[in-house]
Image (tube, helix red, strand yellow):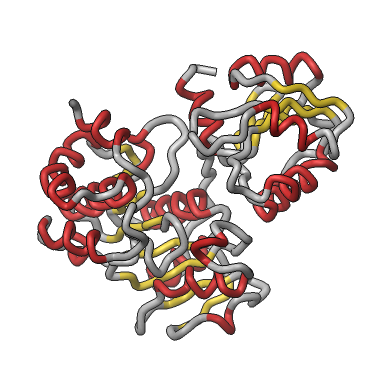
Amino acid sequence: MDELEWLSGLSPWPEDGFGLDRMRALLAALGDPQGSYPAIHVVGTKGKSTATVTIEQLLLADGLSTGATISPHVRSWSDRIRIDGEPADLEAALRRIRPHAERLEATQFESITAAALTAFADAGVDVAVVEAGLGGRHDATNVLRSRVVLLTNVGLEHTDVLGETVEEIATEKLAVVHTDDTVVVLPDDTFAPLVPRGRIVLGSAREAAEAFSGHPLGPDPNVSLPGRLEHRSGEVRDGAHTPAAVDWLRERLPPADYTICASILADKDVDRILARLEPVGRRFVATESTNARSLPAVELANLAREHFDTVEPVADAVAAVRRAHELGEPVLVTGSLYLLADLEAAGA
């Protein structure tokens, strides 16, 4: 079994609950690579990947060697680990960590994170920009020698793990803050009172990069990531998977009467997501992804009929997008990054 097959076959969820003991043991076996460089830690509900790459590009333009890791991916696993703005040699990084990961029974996210942190050390980067996975306190990325923490925003997600309110979720995400960190929070100061310690700066990705560099940086880079407000011919793709993420998307969508093609995981706040999508367009094609938690297209369609005039279930994702275009452009493909990944894998 090659490295990518091995990684793809790992469990994405820890069977024994969330915690950092296994991740710390894995990194210790690898020589604690995360101690080789300072880091910028990006936490939040929406916009983390775009913020991570924006920071990477700003610091690259300033002459620094960078490592960056984002999740999840849409096109391929190689999207996850970047060195100086380019995909790293993923298979080499996985070969480096695989024996230790297998011995410790590391999860998929622990393994890919350890591969990234080790690849950064091997490349001798000046700084790592690391996107957190789930939450912060018990996330596998909460092992960094961070100097800056950026909180992009906070919405209700994974409430069974992170808490029932945005304040509780923000507290879990901000638990990655260490004594000397500079913490960059939303410009409106919403979550500043929850910051446990550190120096607070109001802002976003630029302010996080400048807090690290210590001086003003050049112009904003043009960052375009697959599945993150991705514009195609007659189509927009965005993996908005929470009500707050749909709100964020709606603020940035060009005004139009969209046909919506969506797949939503069963453990998400499905009805509130559909309600947030309702003003975007009156036509809805329900589909499903290959993720085991995806709602079947027929079930999603039944829920969507409360919100849309025209609703059709089409289980095959490629056929669903095609049907959405037949019903009328522009088309918005959304609800899950897993759906977008399936479409990419199918070449659609």
Q: Residue at x 40, y 76 (%)?
A: 177
Q: Position of residue 84 (x, y in %)?
A: 31, 46
Against 330, is 325 above or below?
A: above
Where is residue 35, by image quadrant?
bottom left
Where is residue 96, by image quadrant?
top left
Q: Position of residue 106 (x, y in %)?
A: 24, 50
Against 339, is 105 above or below?
A: below
Q: Residue at x 26, y 47 (%)?
A: 111
Q: Quadrant of the N terminus?
A: top left
Apparent side of residue 74 relative to residue 5 in the rendered image (left or right): right
Apparent side of residue 72 relative to residue 324 in the rendered image (left or right): left
Q: Nearer the viewer, residue 299 or 235?
A: 299
Q: Position of residue 295 (x, y in %)?
A: 61, 35
Q: Quadrant of the C terminus?
A: top right
Q: Residue at x 70, y 33 (%)?
A: 300
Q: Position of residue 40 (x, y in %)?
A: 38, 64
